[in-house]
Image (cartoon, helix red, strand yellow):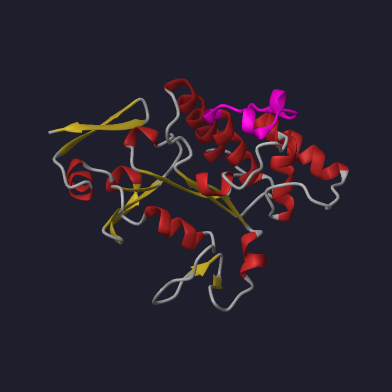
Amino acid sequence: MVLGANGAGKTTLLKLAAAQIQPSSGSATLLGQRLGEVNVFELRTRIGFASSALAAQIPNSETVLNAVMTASYGITGRWNEEYDSIDERRARRVLGEWKLSSFEDRAFGTLSDGERKRVQIARSVMTDPELLLLDEPVASLDLAARELTLQLLSGYAQAKEAPAMVMVTHHLEEIPPGFTHALLMQDGKVMARGEIGMTLTSASISEAFNHPLTLNYQNQRFSAVSS
């Protein structure tokens, strides 16, 4: 779990982890491969990435089934590529896991914000990635849509077959149960990192967000209020 105030560098870090950008200095190693010394297109096939910027590239007219299935080719819309029955079965199974089976023939542009967010996540797991990156997957959702998505993310994170997962947020209440480690960022630098229960404290989040805060933890969920 990566947390920090707006402008802390969270999204830039995630783009780097997704092999979408190169480091401006130093080096970065992803899944044992050093950026600059590896074919990034091959590396990206091992990484699932869900973000609002990527979702904006999905044509509004694309069906939900195709929006998920096209992740097999690393594209966001059908062209001339051909899919076999394995791709379709896999896409339908993923849609079922994310409570989207009834939407497979719907156009992506007709979905609610919560449904679109879940389609983004379903796309990101379509290829069974070794690393799953989620950039604010519940941002701007209403309460019901947020809680459904967090419930699904929590179950997925705790499954035996789940990949390594990194989720970015700046809201403590958006941390799903099952995430084990946290990294706090401030001004483009790592401020604290480690096991989530040890890393997230009233003192650390107050420093990260530059405001006196009291951390609460109840029913496996975090929250904070002004001190």
Q: Which one is nearer the viewer's eye here, 205 or 140?
A: 140
Q: Position of residue 40 (x, y in %)?
A: 61, 68
Residue 33, horizontal then vertical, whole percent: 57, 71
Instruction: Give residue 218's position: percent from left, percent from top.
Output: 31, 26
Q: Position of residue 144 (x, y in %)?
A: 47, 20
Quadrant, the C terminus: top left
* Residue 98 visible, this orientation: no
Provide the residue span drawn in magenta: 98-114
The residue at 49%/25% (across/down) is: 145
Classify residue 81 as left or right of residue 191. right
> Is residue 46 shown left or right of residue 17?
right
Residue found 73% across the figure and 30% down from its top: 104
Q: Is residue 32 left or right of residue 168?
A: right
Q: Nearer the viewer, residue 146 or 203?
A: 146
Do we see residue 120 in this rendering? yes
| Residue 19: in magenta span | no
Left or right: residue 199 versus residue 147 is left
**Does 95 sit above or below residue 206?**
above
Q: Quadrant of residue 102?
A: top right
- At horizontal 23% and vertical 49% (from top left) the residue drawn is 208
Asked if 220 appears above or below 91 in the picture, the reply is: above
